Amino acid sequence: QVQLVESGGGSVQSGGSLRLSCATSGYPNSRASKGWFRQTPGKEREGVAATENDGAVSYAESVKGRFTISQDNTKNTLYLEMNSLKPEDTAIYYCAAAAVRLRYYALSPAFYKYWGQGTQVTVSS
C-alpha cells in the first residue's frame, strides 16, 4: 500500500520561508516522477515542482528561483523548500507520486497516481 504523508505547512508572513516534507512508503517505482502540487478553493490543482530519480527537476514559472524540490532516497522523503513566500502562494499543498517517469508531463496532476492528504500553507501580507 502506497502512502504519502505531508508535513511542514503553516502560516508565515510575506517574504518568509517554509519547508514541506513528504514521507513515502510502499512506493513501487523509485524511478518514477514525484512532485508537489497546490490548490486553492475554486481553482484547479496546479503543478509546482517535480523531480525524477536522475536529478531532473521542473518548476512552475511562478515559483522558479524561490522554491526548491529535493528528495532523500535514504529516508524515502520528498521536500519542498519555499523561500520569499508571497500571499499568492497560499494554498493546500500536496505531494504526489506517479507510476512511471513523466518527463514533459511531470507538472501535470492528471498523470499522478498516488497522493498525500495535503498540508495548508498560508502567507499573510
Image (spheres, rainbow, N blue to C red):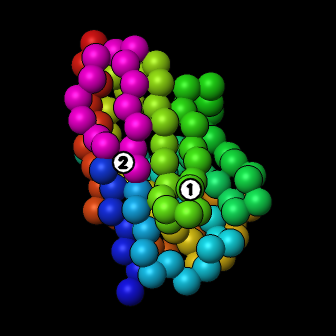
Q: Circles 1 and 2: CB distance less than 8 Å?
A: no
Residue 20 inside the magenta-drawn segment = yes
Name the residue located 28 percent from the left edge and 17 percent from the top edge: 13
Q: Position of residue 57 (x, y in %)?
A: 69, 48
Residue 83 inside the magenta-drawn segment = no
**Amino acid type of disc 2?**
Tyr
Q: State which quarter of the image contains the C terminus.
A: top left
Total residue callouts: 2
Q: Secondary structure at mark 1?
A: strand
- Where residue 2 sits, quadrant-wise, is bottom left
Name the residue located 55 percent from the left edge and 83 percent from the top edge: 28
- Where residue 90 sits, quadrant-wise, is top left
Q: Residues within 10 Å of mark 2 (few under 14, many from 20)?
A: many
**Amino acid type of disc 1?**
Asp
Q: Which residues are magenta?
A: 8-21
Q: Mark 1 or 2, which is nearer the eye?
A: 1
| Residue 93 disc label | 2
- Where residue 8 sits, quadrant-wise, is top left
Front position in the image: 71 or 9: 71
Q: Position of residue 56 (x, y in %)?
A: 75, 52
Front position in the image: 73 or 123: 73
The residue identified by callout 1 is 72
